Amino acid sequence: MNNIMNMFKKTRYATIPVVQEKKEPQRPLDPDSERLNSKRRIELTADAESFEPMFENIRSENPLGFEGYDERLAMLCEKTNLTEAVTTGVCTVEGVKTCIAVMDSEFLMGSMGSVVGERLTCLFEYATENSLPVVVFCASGGARMHEGIFSLMQMAKVSGAVWKHSQAGLLYISVLTDPTTGGVTASFAMLGDIIIAEPNALVGFAGRRVIEGTISQKLPDNFQRAEFLLEHGFVDILCKRNELRTTIGKMLKLHTGEDTK
């Protein structure tokens, strides 16, 4: 017994030295990396004082009676000054009248519930009836779990409205921002006639770890980033934030036949 005790006393265990962390000089914020709320998006995209909100009266009624959901919605409405995760309306972009929808990741991570789906559907239907183009800024974590199957139904509903808009020969521009994932990616986000992505935006369906665990393979480092999607044909163009308004304006004018000079 004494021999065993002596063995432990003589053993020297490795220790991890404490290294003073070196502070790197603070880098200036990349203007394309900061997530923008819907208000700021509209300010950067729409012509000054041209935006008119629509369908704000459509509100969630907690269809499944999910515990704590009503309180969470009320808290977020007060905190963000929004009524839901998407803001819809009409504006002009470079002088062209356009229907616009902006998803906001500050409101339940931009998740798509029944109200988000209904507002988007109504917007596309309005655009079809009035022969207007649609621009949607996508930013979402996917379907909203608090509403179960009701949230998943929105994928088909919005996609149907997009199809009718397309059949009328009208333009739909989808702008993928960071992050665009889940059921939003699997439906209307990837149905645009033109798909624009901001640099380095995260775009995908399932999460990286889920995919790697399923296929038992290591994914590329830039997998599900906008540059990877452009390289593989899922995105038409990468556009820096300060060039978005001009780029979208030119596309709208080309579609309407207006002078793009």
Image (cartoon, helix red, strand yellow):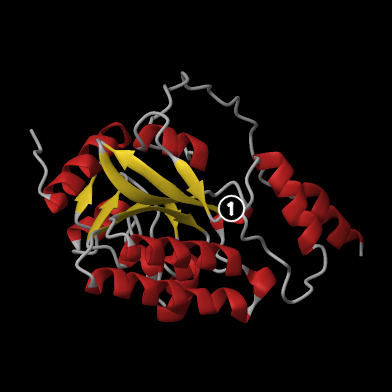
Q: Is residue 175 above or below residue 78?
A: below
The N terminus is located in which quarter?
bottom right
Specify the quadrant that holds the C terminus: top left
**Compared to 31, does 234 lie above or below?**
below
| Residue 190 in sight here | yes
| Pointer 1 local density, CA inside 10 Å: few below 14, some 14–19, many at least 20 | some
Whole-percent x, y for residue 140 in the image: 50, 57
Q: Does residue 151 appear left or right of residue 139 in this picture?
A: right
Residue 207 visible in the current orientation: no
- The x and y percentages for residue 259 are 8, 39
Q: Which residue is mark 1?
A: 56
- Residue at (54% x, 49% y) in the render: 105
What residue sits 86% from the left and 60% below the top?
Answer: 3
Amino acid type at mark 1: Glu
Q: Is residue 45 left or right of residue 171?
A: right
Q: Quadrant of residue 47?
A: top left
Q: How many marks?
A: 1
